[in-house]
Image (cartoon, rainbow, N blue to C red):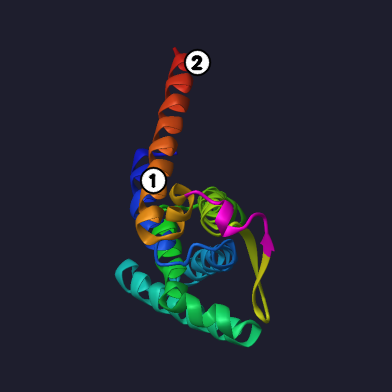
Amino acid sequence: MEKKEIYLYIPLSFAFLLPVPGRFAFGLVMIIELYLMSVCEILFKKLTLKFFNRELHNVITMIVLVSMCILFRQFMILFSPLVAFVMGIAFFMPALTSFVMGSWYSDSVLPLPQELCAALKKCSMFSVFAAVFFLIRDIFGYGTVSFPYPGGVFEIQLFGMKDSFFLFSFLASIPGAVVLLLLFSAVFFKAVSVFEIIETSRVD
């Protein structure tokens, strides 16, 4: 992983994770949409680069991704109106995230299958990060693990709110999400630094 990619993870994390309510159900919807946007971004990029210059290609790609977000939101309105209503503008965050991730491969000349695999690998790393983030907030903030379903949000109750500590319930709030995200980022950077040291020692 290149350093410029590492530095992009923090603003992407804030843009993608913070606008979403702290339930695993909503995070799961966002992750599914992110995979869809990432695939669409790569496929459409390959197509438009054949007909448009680089500057116009970026504009058209962003318009298409936003349009795909609108279509995905319409699908969610049909599937679960409550989930679609609660998420609101957060539906458009995967378009920004996938566009930035796709820009890492803007000069790539790899065949389409290899470029898709590379993009989905980055998407999967970010998705695991996001899934753990939402799961921790859901479990310790609400005492549940939740999933989207047509009636709204299906909850598996793990413990009651009376059994939760204030520190844990704090994670359900926006300030708590910021603190948790900063802790996650610190651990992530530390892990990357350790792996870089290990790789450097192997080369030496």
Q: Amino acid at mark 1?
A: Glu
The answer to whether residue 88 is left or right of residue 78 is: left
Q: Is residue 51 above or below residue 167?
A: below
Residue at 47% across, 16% down: 203
Q: Position of residue 6 (x, y in %)?
A: 38, 43
SS state under label 1: helix
Q: Which label sits on residue 72? A: none
Q: Let me know if residue 120 appears in the view.
A: no
Instruction: Please say whether residue 133 is visible from this viewpoint.
Output: yes
Magenta-drawn segment: 156-165
Which of the two discs, 1 and 2, labels the residue nearer the N terminus?
1
Q: Which mark is residue 202?
A: 2
Q: Quadrant of residue 62?
A: bottom left
User: What is the CA distance from the residue labelled 1 to the residue labelled 2?
Assistant: 23 Å
Q: Residue at x 41, y 55 (%)?
A: 177
Quarter of the picture containing the C terminus is top left
**Crowd band around label 2 with a 10 angstrom C-alpha radius: few (<14), some (14–19), many (20+):** few
Q: Nearer the viewer, residue 2 or 146?
A: 146
Name the residue rendered at 42%, 54% in the picture.
170
Report crowding for label 1: few under 14, some 14 to 19, many 20 or more residues within 10 A (C-alpha). few
Percent of width and height locating residue 162: 56, 56
Tag 2: amino acid? Arg
The correct choice, above or below, for 100 with respect to 91 in the image is above
x%, y% of residue 155?
66, 66
In the foreground, 49 or 195? 195
Magenta stretch contains residue 157: yes
Q: Residue at x 33, y 66 (%)?
A: 54
Residues 81 and 37: in front is 81
Q: Which mark is residue 5?
A: 1
Quick one: which residue is furthest to the top in this view? 204
Helix, strand or loop at label 2? It is helix
Task: Determine whether label 1 and label 2 are within 8 Å by CB.
Answer: no
